[in-house]
Image (spheres, helix red, strand yellow):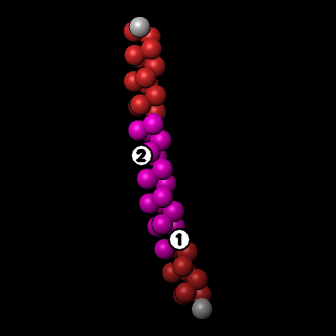
Amino acid sequence: MPNTLKYTLQSFMKDFGDMKKIYLKKAVNQHKRFLARARTLVKK
């Protein structure tokens, strides 16, 4: 029983880590897009 709990916790942490990576990548891309847009607005 504790073994199953440990395994579930590990797999959950792994999924959470992957989700965090994907989320961070998306956030960085959105931030880059926002910066590029801000730069073009400043140039005009």
Q: Which residue is mark 1?
A: 12
Q: Quadrant of residue 41?
A: top left
Q: Which mark is residue 25?
A: 2
Residue 20 lies within the magenta run: yes
Spot the residue most to the top.
Answer: 44
Q: Is residue 1 left or right of residue 35?
A: right
Q: Quadrant of residue 3?
A: bottom right
Estimate the x, y position of residue 20 in percent, counting from the top left: 49, 54
Residue in view at x 44 percent, y 60 percent: 18
Estimate the x, y position of residue 29 in percent, counting from the top left: 41, 38
Residue in view at x 45 percent, y 36 percent: 30
Q: Which mark is residue 3?
A: none
Q: Amino acid at mark 2?
A: Lys
> Which quadrant of the figure contains the C terminus?
top left
Residue in the foreground of this view, choosing between 38 and 22: 38
- Per the image, label 1 sits on a secondary structure element best described as helix
Q: Is residue 5 above or below residue 23?
A: below
Magenta residues? 11-30
Q: Earlier in the sequence, mark 1 or mark 2?
A: 1
Q: Is residue 13 above or below residue 27?
A: below
Residue in view at x 48 percent, y 50 percent: 23
Badge count: 2
Assess disc 1: are there few (<14), some (14-19) or many (≥20) residues with their C-alpha within 10 Å of its C-alpha.
few
